[in-house]
Image (cartoon, rainbow, N blue to C red):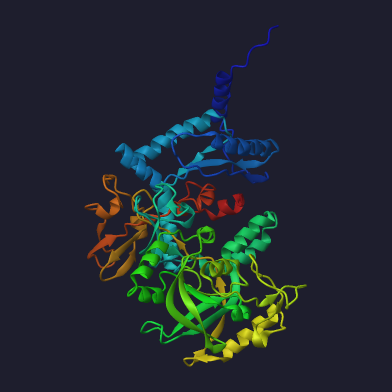
Amino acid sequence: MASERYNAPAREKHWQKAWEDGEIFRASDDRSKPKCYVLEMFPYPSGRIHMGHVRNYAMGDVFARFKRAKGFNVLHPMGWDAFGMPAENAAIERKTHPATWTYANIDTMKTQLRSMGLSLDWSRELATCSPDYYAHQQKLFLDLLKTGLAYRRSSKVNWDPVDHTVLANEQVIDGRGWRSGALVEQRELTQWFFKITQYSDELLEALGTLDKWPEKVRLMQANWIGRSEGMLVRWALDAATAPAGFSELEIYTTRPDTLFGASFMAIAPDHPLAKSAAEKNPELAAFCDECRRMGTSVADLESAEKRGFDTGIRAVHPFDPSWTVPVYVANFVLMEYGTGAIFGCPSGDQRDLDFARAYGLPVVPVVLPAGASAETFTIGDEAADGEGTMINSRFLDGLSTDAAFEEAASRLEKASLGGRPAGQRKVNFRLRDWGISRQRYWGCPIPVVHCDDCGIVPVPAKDLPVRLPDDATFDKPGNPLDRHPTWKHVACPTCAKPARRETDTMDTFVDSSWYYARFTAPHAETPIDTDAANYWLPV
């Protein structure tokens, strides 16, 4: 008998319909079985799936089918990370509405994914641009606001001058916006934040419980949190060189033991001292403006050429009143980290060494590595940033770096500058609070009202969700919610006087930060059903 050629389109459609009719892949409530939650990446509905999608979802599908065949109760959901600037840009280019573009893409991509025969539970499908989803996100925001974990303050941000919105550090690539390609600017804006720094220690400690994570990933996370033990050290400024009103400069350092290797101070372009000095120095002002066009991520700072501008101001060494060092404005120092000022020890830090070589500053070895000779040891192209024995450090000579830290810290705590201790011990974190504001239309509205009399007022729960207006226009750059004729005008929920809605929307990273939990009970009346989440999680 001749073998029948396999008719893939016909047979696959047949079985896909059989699976759908029988709800074969629908996660059950049978908790007598062992459970398995399989979750691949949360796709953005860009228009069509590509081979990256196919590869990713095929691997997840194999795993989900294997677990189901082994008798597991499997949750394998799918949804759409559907808000974001690309939809707004597409609306401008195509003279359409972001919702129209987004939902059309969802329909196309869903059809393509279904044609693959993936074992997905489509009954749990969600889209972050749906009011059914972002209503619950607004509830979560109001809970955070009530407890003080959501707050508003002025901050320096990455500003895309083409897309007219704030960018996260991860969205700045080589100093340019990831979508527009425009050179990013640094601006001071009033933004909404989540106070994630409140959990810095807890996050760091919890890494130790993730014993199934790769060690390199845990190390990356620990470095991102960046806990350090150091000191706030106050340096007097030479009165003959400092601007009026400035008498000292406070820095944060983890290495007070290397203070005798100091050859310069560096401050951020937005440091108050830099701004004051730039008022009468056009060249310095231009340099500061140039620095503000850089990205603010650690990667940007580490990869950029180290550049500085000598302000002419001198700082007095805290251990020697006759010793002064120059104060530079530097492109690698940020106001958001520490105090916005550092002292440079070129022999002990590679960044400082590169800077010192570029500007002809002294490089004095202060830490002698084990096995090296004090008589012959010099600093070449690499800094000696490890532990060792102190040299060229006066009263610290001969001490280990740990002992020198304690001795230097003790003396700084006892020394007085302006009636206060010259130094104070401090634990610092690299982690910063999460800026969630975006100046765009296609995002989850932030559910607060601004009233001249009452201040920031939460939108009452009964009035949620705060929906996006359907009649926004996209014919001009900037945030359509700002220029909408009626949407932003509302009565204050507290005093009933005329007030204004918040026109910033939430970063899409907020949308995709909790969907994994929503999948466990996507139709619940609360953002998360505790019982379902406790059963299905972790992924």
**Viewer-proximal residue among 469 and 401:** 401
Residue at 63%, 37% (x, y): give it: 59
Q: Quadrant of residue 244?
A: bottom left
Extreme right residue here?
A: 371
Residue 234 in view in this figure: yes
Describe residue 148's horizontal placement relative to residue 231 as left or right: left
Q: How many marks?
A: 0
Q: Quadrant of residue 438?
A: bottom left
**Viewer-proximal residue among 224 and 416:** 416
Image: 216 above or below 235: above
Estimate the x, y position of residue 208 in percent, counting from the top left. Answer: 67, 63
Extreme top residue here?
A: 1
Residue at 37%, 82% (x, y): give it: 243
Residue 527 in view in this figure: no
Residue at 36%, 40% (x, y): give it: 90
Estimate the x, y position of residue 86 in percent, counting from the top left. Answer: 40, 44
**Viewer-proximal residue among 63 and 158:** 158
Estimate the x, y position of residue 390 in percent, counting from the top left. Answer: 69, 80
Quarter of the image where the N terminus is located: top right
Estimate the x, y position of residue 83 in percent, counting from the top left. Answer: 41, 47
Q: Quadrant of residue 290?
A: bottom left
Residue at 69%, 79% (x, y): give it: 402
Describe residue 355's horizontal placement relative to residue 372 as left or right: left
